[in-house]
Image: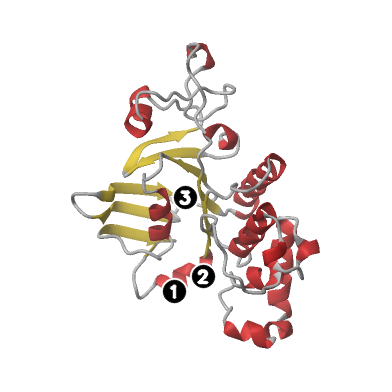
């Protein structure tokens, strides 16, 4: 059996009275594209930060690429990891070219970037150009990042997460600020990276219907994983109630929808969850 890229065992974070994550175990293999859904406050962003080594859990064990994630190994393991945070509402007013923002995702990046030292590293420049090409932002590489639209900035952030060509990619609501056409292109790109480069992708998203034809599985998270739906699975009604309450039902757009109830079960008052 192949070594999983991500292996979490009984992870807990937060106080006993107000746990953010509790008794969470998860295993994800190479080339797997997982969608993570759950209500606000479910611990989705916290889970990604823990896997990225940015937050230390209060209990539990984490392996990445078959090695224990700890203070000693964290920096080395992070070289094979890309992470796209949630969009920040306010950006620092610092003049940066788009290329410079993407360069921040490289392991070799440091403050010497502003002294022009990156200009002598052709292999680094090739990685930056390739990452920008993946998100269709090559034409803007010398533009001021602050002057871009919200959707363009998000695509540059994605390029920053991709520039080191990671084995594991963590995405926190990557479709935020993207129009429907670029959302579709994003999911297509991620599917291609999983299939052709064996990249593992864990992606937090709210709209299960939008991602279901691209992901391999959907993890239902609310403090712990209530259900992990593979293709062909239907998430039980009680799982939806545990996560969102009695007033929400998920209805499939078609038969391929992972985790959704069959269309024939839809009464007049049901609606889609976004």
Where 35 falls versus 213 (above or below)? below
Question: Is label 3 in a helix, a strand or a loop?
Answer: loop
Question: Is label 1 in a helix, a strand or a loop?
Answer: helix
The x, y position of residue 28, in whole percent, is: 44, 49
Question: What numbered label is drawn on residue 86?
Answer: none
Residue drawn at point x = 37 percent, y = 60 percent: 63
Residue drawn at point x = 70 percent, y = 86 percent: 116
* Circle 2 Cα neighbour tier, 10 Å, few/some/many (<14 / 14–19 / ≥20): some
The x, y position of residue 34, in whole percent, is: 50, 44
Question: What numbered label is drawn on residue 29?
Answer: 3
User: Are circles 1 and 2 on residues that touch, CB within 8 Å?
Assistant: yes
> Between marks 1 and 2, how big is the CA–CA gap?
7 Å
Give the labeled residue for mark 1.
75
61 left or right, relative to 188? left
Nearer-N-terminus badge (2/3):
3
* Circle 3 Cα neighbour tier, 10 Å, few/some/many (<14 / 14–19 / ≥20): some
13 left or right, relative to 81? left
Q: Nearer the viewer, mark 3 or mark 1?
A: 1
Residue drawn at point x = 71 percent, y = 76 percent: 123
- Give the color scheme: rainbow, by chain, secondary structure or one colour: secondary structure
Question: Is label 2 in a helix, a strand or a loop?
Answer: helix
The x, y position of residue 253, in whole percent, is: 58, 23
Asked if residue 140 shows in the view, the reply is yes
Give the labeled residue for mark 2.
79
Where 107 falls versus 233 (above or below)? below
> Between marks 3 and 1, how big is the CA–CA gap?
21 Å
In the displayed image of the protein, which residue is found farthest to the right? Answer: 139
């Amino acid at each position: 059996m192949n070594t999983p890229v991500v292996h979490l065992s009984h992870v807990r974070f937060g106080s006993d009275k107000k746990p953010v994550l509790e008794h969470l175990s998860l295993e994800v293999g190479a080339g797997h594209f997982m969608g993570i859904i759950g209500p606000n406050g479910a611990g989705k962003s916290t889970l990604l930060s823990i896997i990225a080594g940015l937050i230390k859990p209060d209990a539990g064990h984490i392996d990445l690429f078959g090695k224990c994630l700890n203070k000693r190994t964290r920096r080395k393991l992070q070289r094979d990891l890309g992470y796209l945070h949630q969009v920040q509402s306010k950006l620092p007013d610092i003049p940066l070219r788009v290329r410079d923002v993407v360069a921040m995702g490289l392991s070799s990046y440091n403050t010497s970037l502003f002294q022009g030292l990156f200009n002598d590293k052709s292999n680094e420049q090739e990685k930056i150009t390739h990452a920008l090409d993946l998100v269709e932002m090559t034409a803007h590489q010398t533009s001021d990042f602050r002057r871009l639209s919200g959707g363009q900035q998000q695509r540059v952030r994605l390029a920053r997460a991709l520039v080191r060509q990671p084995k594991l990619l963590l995405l926190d609501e990557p479709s935020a600020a993207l129009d429907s056409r670029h959302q579709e292109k994003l999911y297509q790109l991620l599917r291609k990276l999983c299939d052709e480069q064996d990249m593992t992708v864990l992606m937090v998203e709210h709209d299960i219907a939008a991602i279901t034809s691209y992901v391999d599985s959907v993890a239902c998270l609310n403090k712990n994983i209530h259900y992990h739906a593979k293709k062909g699975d239907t998430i039980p009604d009680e799982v939806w109630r545990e996560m969102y309450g009695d007033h929400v039902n998920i209805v499939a757009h078609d038969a391929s929808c992972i985790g959704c109830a069959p269309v024939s079960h839809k009464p007049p008052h049901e609606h889609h969850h976004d």
